[in-house]
Image (tube, rainbow, N blue to C red):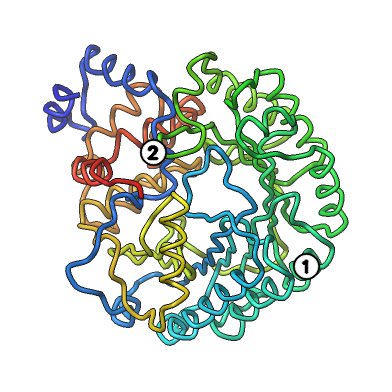
Amino acid sequence: MTSIRQSLYHTNQDGQPPFSSGELQQWTGHITAHPYRNYLYSYPHKTAYREFASPLSLAELWRDEPAESFFLYMHIPFCGARCGFCNLFTLPDKRANVHAEYVDALERQAKQWAAFTRHKPYARFAIGGGTPSLLAPAQLNRLFSIATDIMGVDLSTTSISVETSPETLTEEKLSILKEHTVDRVSMGIQSFVAAESAAIYRPQDPEVVYRALELLGQYDFPVLNLDLIYGLPGQTVDSWLYSLNQALLQEPEEIFIYPLYTREHTIVKPGDLLSQSDIRHDCYQAACALLAAHGYRQYSMRRFAKEDAGTSKELLDYSCQEEGMVGLGCGARSYTRNVHYASRYGVSRKATESIIADYVAAERYDTADYGIVLSLAEQKRRFILKAILHSEGLTVADYNRRFGSSLWEDHPELGLLVQSGFATEEEGILRLTPDGLGYSDSIGDWFISGEIREQMQEFIVP
């Protein structure tokens, strides 16, 4: 890629860089050779976080945050079991007393954070994990009390989302969600084929899944989302489409499809799949066609939804750039415009148990000591990535207005997206084409800065 990067600053009269056919071919080959490099759900990735030289005062940090509304996120890091593909901050632990102690700590944290985050309204509220619905009803109910009574969330103007799993759903828990006007319930199914679930260390009886879906249907939440994974051990395109069709029978308002990722620190290792063909791109293309035929619009590489999916609430606006993210709980990230911070990151049981124990034992939560301070250059990259990897695209004028500089002068390499056909620029919006969306992960990986990439590579996952 060196020759490409050396030629980026030679632009023509309209500000877009001309690339030779050789450069374009080299770049396109780089993007298409390995489509599934990284799932860039945030930028910078948490593996780029480090201990701050000195703790940052959260009161000062949030006082100057320019976001007009905030997003409250609560992280529940407990699951019934760790799936074979999972590298998230989560701990397999079903003990009710452990959950209760954790929610106690989350409430202590909320009481301290409310002092410096209640000056602006919340437009979004999500409870994720882990598996939040693993909590006992009393603890699940407490999370909503913490949100409304302590953090100041107005349920009538806030979009509310909760993650669940089939084996944890009960009428009592769903009644709590309904009572608190939850707008979106997301359930991770991954596969309707028992053998495929077992292959990723997720023993799951399809009948349990169907019972959970039937129960969910009785509560008529505005948005039901179902998560599925393609590229599983032993999976074929036909068995993938079987699972997708089973999901479509439920008529969910939203479907997320994820390619399987394997890493050395997950249970299913990259070498475990060497004996089978990589069918992920074939599965993705087949899913796009099937979902389009059933009236689902594609919003990103992963998200497909019905055009009319949504809540009847009059919601406050919230930036797609995900600034003003207030993350409560161990493992939750918080985003201000120029500082991202969180608890330390781990995957192994020993590491996650230790980090959670420190969180539960803490008395003060009013400083940030682990994260990253974003330079102006990294703020620009984040702004670009969070826009172009979604179908809405990046409005060039928004970028120019926010940063006081020209998008094409700052990042002429984006012209490769247009010249390759992976993106278009029409009416001032840089937007990935359908083909480009399919390569979102490799495009996102390509756009990571050298400095951030180096920090990520130096990180040793505990």
Location of residue 381 with respect to 238 vertically, above or below? below
Q: 424 or 35: nearer the eye?
A: 35
**Residue where numbered disc 2 is placed:** 430
Residue mark closest to the camera, 1 vs 2: 1
> Residue 443's image quarter?
top left
Looking at the image, which residue is at 29% across and 46% down? 460
Question: Which amino acid lies under the numbered mark 1 shown in the image of this protein?
Answer: Lys
Location of residue 434 with respect to 22 vertically, above or below? below
Q: Secondary structure at mark 1?
A: helix
Give the number of callouts: 2
Looking at the image, which residue is at 58% across and 54% down? 92
Looking at the image, which residue is at 47% across and 71% down? 69
Question: Which amino acid lies under the numbered mark 2 shown in the image of this protein?
Answer: Leu
Q: 190 or 161: nearer the eye?
A: 190
> Residue 426's image quarter?
top left
Real-space CA distance between mark 1 and mark 2, rounded to the nearest whole angstrom: 39 Å
Position of 77 with respect to 94 (left or right) is left
How crowded pointer 1 is (Cα within 10 Å; few <14, some 14-19, many 20+) is rated as some
Q: Position of residue 445 (x, y in %)?
A: 34, 35
**Residue where numbered disc 1 is placed:** 178
Location of residue 129 with respect to 272 vertically, above or below? below
Q: Position of residue 91 (x, y in %)?
A: 53, 56
Position of 199 with respect to 31 (left or right) is right
Q: 103 or 326: nearer the eye?
A: 103
Position of 184 with respect to 105 (left or right) is right
Q: Secondary structure at mark 2?
A: strand
Q: Position of residue 35 (x, y in %)?
A: 42, 25
How crowded pointer 2 is (Cα within 10 Å; few <14, some 14-19, many 20+) is rated as many
Q: Position of residue 349 (x, y in %)?
A: 47, 53
